[in-house]
């Protein structure tokens, strides 16, 4: 076969796989497991890098419209390009012209480099994400099989295909369906949109209050940042609800931002006309909220958390916030990294592995969480700012894939 044709074919294959992954369809995540083959079979180190870059550039294109939410278009394109180049580099470094079993450990090195920090902080669209759809319920064995599969296919294709068929068929027969969530647990999806102003935060708190009172669920999980700045006013407003929750054994898990400094003007909160806000909320005539509702939050350092309130009480901190958009390595504001923070939190006797929004598209947070032997996987997201992109669908598919791989029930609460 013509070498140039082979190069173009592998380049196009890598691009096609990347585009399939970007759509967030489970089949795309499964196809991603074959991406390393295009790099290992390359005729040169340059071709290996080009194929990897084709995969990441095609797979990460939704980053551009997403990054435009907090950066101008040129900066968004730069973030996309730099991410693709950085994630492609390990595949070029481990490339070898030889085709033998020793190339398998090189393949593992490239995949591990894309999972562990520092690259793991931007470890998007890992070829391992689809392991749960290939080998459900197999845990670390299935993960290892997915990682080793491309190298084995190159060395002994018949044996590899036979092993994949046997392990895949067996695991699907044993674990044909998703695990049901714990009894009494409920994920609440909301449509609050941008909750950055005081009125929207009041609307969210009011909705939480009403939902808790009306629901018979023992555990209610609300999306990320439904209350982006939790304050004393929030606690005071929900105090009666939280007291009622404790009395009936109900637990509220609420995505909230905890300011390290006061993030909302105290005078604005004190002067806020809650009665007028309630009337505006309940009216059907398009009445506007009070002017004080439009006061925006100040830009101060804060932690992105899941607050567990009611019959249980604890705080779970997001470990890997969105770089640049939330985590600002060279700035004093934003959300800090918490790589050494606990990976699970106890809710209603269950060890919950919590993935907060951005963490759902990474591999590192979920793998470290599984080391703590979780009994349920919980995802919370705030996707209004990436509406119109396939990122929310990818998040859902990835969360479900990890739940299937480790045989865990999962719940996903999304604010759109």
Image (spheres, rainbow, N blue to C red):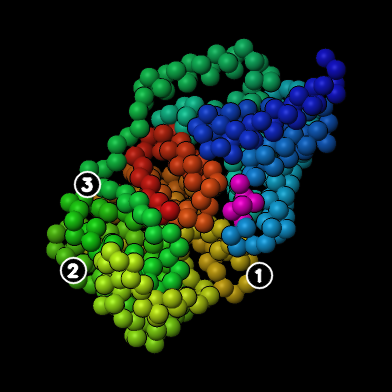
Secondary element under disc 2, as helix, strand or loop, is helix
Mark 2 vs mark 1: which is more N-terminal?
2
**Left or right: where does residue 230 sit relative to residue 206?**
right
Classify 10 Å Cα crowding around label 1: few (below 14), some (14-19), many (20 and above): few
In the image, the segment drawn in magenta is 62-67
Q: Quadrant of residue 287?
A: bottom left
Q: Assign a secondary structure to mark 1.
A: loop
Q: Residue 106 in the image: state x and y as whole percent.
A: 70, 34
> In the figure, is residue 291 to the left or right of 127?
left
- Ranked by sequence position, the earlier of labels 3 and 1 is 3
In magenta stretch: residue 359? no
Circle 3 — which element? Answer: loop
The numbered disc on residue 184 is 3
Query: For this view, does 77 lie left or right of residue 371?
Result: right
Question: Which of the marked residues, 2 or 3, is nearer the chain's N terminus?
Answer: 3
Q: Dot 3 surroundings within 10 Å: few (below 14), some, or many (20 or more)?
A: few
Residue that appears at 18% across and 68% down: 243
Image quarter where the N terminus lies is top right
Instruction: Considering the whole magenta stretch, tell me its main secondary structure.
Output: helix
At a point 56% along the width and 31% down the height, the residue shown is 28
Q: Which mark is residue 68?
A: none
Seen in the picture, residue 32 relative to 3 is either above or below; the reply is: below
As drawn, the label of residue 330 is: 1
Q: Residue at x 22, y 59 (%)?
A: 212
Return the x and y of residue 381 as percentages of the image width and height: 44, 53
């Amino acid at each position: 076969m013509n070498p140039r044709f082979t190069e173009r074919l592998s380049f196009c294959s890598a691009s096609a796989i990347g585009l399939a992954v970007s759509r967030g369809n489970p089949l795309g995540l499964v196809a991603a497991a074959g991406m390393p083959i295009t790099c290992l079979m390359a005729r040169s180190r340059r071709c290996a890098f080009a194929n990897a870059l084709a995969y990441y550039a095609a797979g990460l294109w939704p980053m551009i419209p997403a990054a435009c939410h907090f950066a101008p278009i040129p900066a968004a394109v730069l973030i996309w390009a730099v991410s693709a180049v950085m994630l492609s580099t390990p595949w070029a470094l481990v490339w070898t012209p030889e085709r033998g079993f020793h190339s398998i450990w090189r393949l593992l090195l490239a995949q591990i480099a894309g999972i562990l920090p520092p690259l793991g902080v931007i470890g998007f669209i890992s070829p391992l994400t689809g392991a749960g759809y290939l080998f459900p319920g197999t845990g670390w064995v299935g993960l290892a099989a997915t990682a080793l599969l491309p190298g084995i296919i190159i060395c002994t294709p018949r044996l590899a295909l036979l092993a994949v068929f046997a392990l895949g068929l067996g695991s699907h027969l044993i674990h044909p369906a998703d695990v049901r969530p714990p009894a009494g647990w409920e994920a609440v999806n909301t449509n609050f949109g941008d909750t950055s102003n005081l009125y929207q935060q009041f609307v969210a708190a009011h909705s939480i209050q009403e939902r808790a009172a009306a629901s018979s669920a023992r555990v209610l999980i609300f999306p990320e940042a439904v209350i982006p700045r939790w304050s004393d006013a929030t606690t005071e407003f929900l105090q009666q609800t939280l007291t009622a929750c404790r009395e009936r054994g109900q637990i509220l898990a609420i995505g909230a931002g905890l300011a390290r400094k006061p993030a909302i003007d105290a005078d604005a909160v004190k002067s806020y006309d809650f009665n007028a806000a309630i009337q505006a909320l309940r009216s059907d005539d398009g009445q506007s909220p009070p002017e004080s509702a439009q006061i925006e939050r100040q830009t101060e350092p804060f932690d992105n958390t899941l607050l567990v309130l009611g019959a249980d009480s604890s705080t779970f901190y997001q470990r890997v916030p969105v770089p640049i958009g939330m985590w600002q390595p060279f700035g004093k504001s934003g959300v800090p990294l918490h790589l050494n923070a606990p990976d699970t939190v106890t809710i209603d006797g269950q060890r919950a592995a919590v993935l907060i929004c951005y963490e759902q598209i990474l591999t590192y947070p979920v793998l470290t969480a599984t080391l703590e032997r979780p009994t349920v996987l919980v995802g919370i997201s705030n996707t209004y700012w990436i509406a119109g992109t396939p990122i929310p669908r990818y998040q859902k598919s990835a969360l479900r894939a990890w739940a299937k791989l480790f045989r865990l029930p999962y719940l996903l609460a999304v604010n759109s």
